Amino acid sequence: MFEKRLKKTLLALLFIYISANALYVAKPAIFNEGSFSVKIILFPTFAMRTIFNKTLEVFNTIMNSKNILKENEELKKRLDSLQLENMFLKRELENFQRLNNVENYAKKFPFSVEISKIVGRNPKLWHQYLIIDGGKNKYFTPGMPVVTKDGLIGKIVEVYDSYSKVLLLIDPEFSVDVRGEKSGVLALCSGIGTSVLKINYVPKFEELVLGETLVTSGLDGSFPEGIPVGYVIEINKPFGDYFLDAYVVPVVDILKIKEVIVIRAFHKKIK
């Protein structure tokens, strides 16, 4: 008899315990102000609920972090794309400004000129030749001077249907009559196959000025007068020699030019 009552009591307590925990899961606010003993009774459910909430919180944090990382990757790709686009736009703007400057400079020439782009170089002969667009189609002919807005770079030596070959002024086969802007000294300036030019046939008694600009004299009839050629960087007077030993650095950096101006026609002085 006693055992039956004990079983009924235990079953009733178990039912109450399960019901209380179920109610706590459904409506935990009811038990927030409960006594300490109630919280002890509900501890397993409280602990499980806390663990579940913390686990859910960690899971949400991880998912949010993944979403943030994904958004960051997409933003980085977009930023890279925008930077690349900006680089191309900047380059196009620089090309436009450079070409505009060349065109404005070309308009100042009192003779017929044509703007051309460099379309080819030979790495082994970078100091000798370059290829420009335009040939017979633009009425180019061998001997036409080639310049930039800064100064002389060479002359056309070979012409084809749509491109031409330009001999650079630093090549040993190139020479031009020049005049010192300050000293007025006349000389022959020739390429020597390096990044500098050599001044020839200037007597020692002539007062060539170190650092002065040499310009085309126009006396050779091949180039218009007054085009900058280079700056005097060295003057020597070797013992026993009649002529100066002097060198010039070109005013134009051959490796950086992208557009050139071909002088198609100018008034040549009578030799």
Image (tube, rainbow, N blue to C red):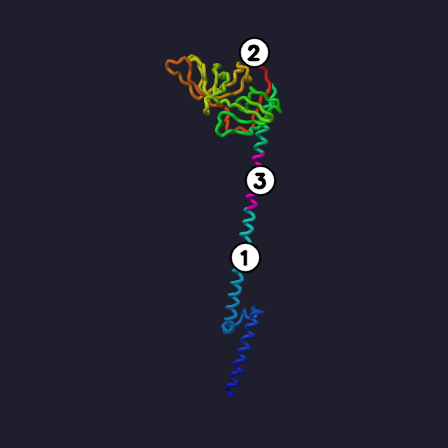
In the image shown, does 114 or 94 lie closer to the viewer?
114
Residue wearing tag 3: 85
Residue 63 is marked as: 1
Amino acid type at circle 2 is Ile
Q: Quadrant of residue 224?
A: top right
Q: CA distance from mark 3 to mark 2?
A: 54 Å
Residue wearing tag 2: 270
**Residue drawn 55% across the image and 38% down it:** 87
**Residue drawn 56% across the image and 72% down it:** 22
Q: Does the magenta stretch mainly form a helix, a strand or a loop?
A: helix
Among numbered discs 1 and 3, the one appearing first in the sequence: 1
> Can residue 158 be seen by looking at this rendering?
yes
Amino acid type at circle 1 is Met
Farthest bottom residue in view:
1
Q: CA distance from mark 1 to mark 3?
A: 33 Å
Instruction: Give the answer, above or below, for where 19 lies relative to 120.
Output: below
Secondary structure, mark 2, is: loop
- Crowding at label 1, few (<14), some or many (≥20) Cα neighbours within 10 Å? few
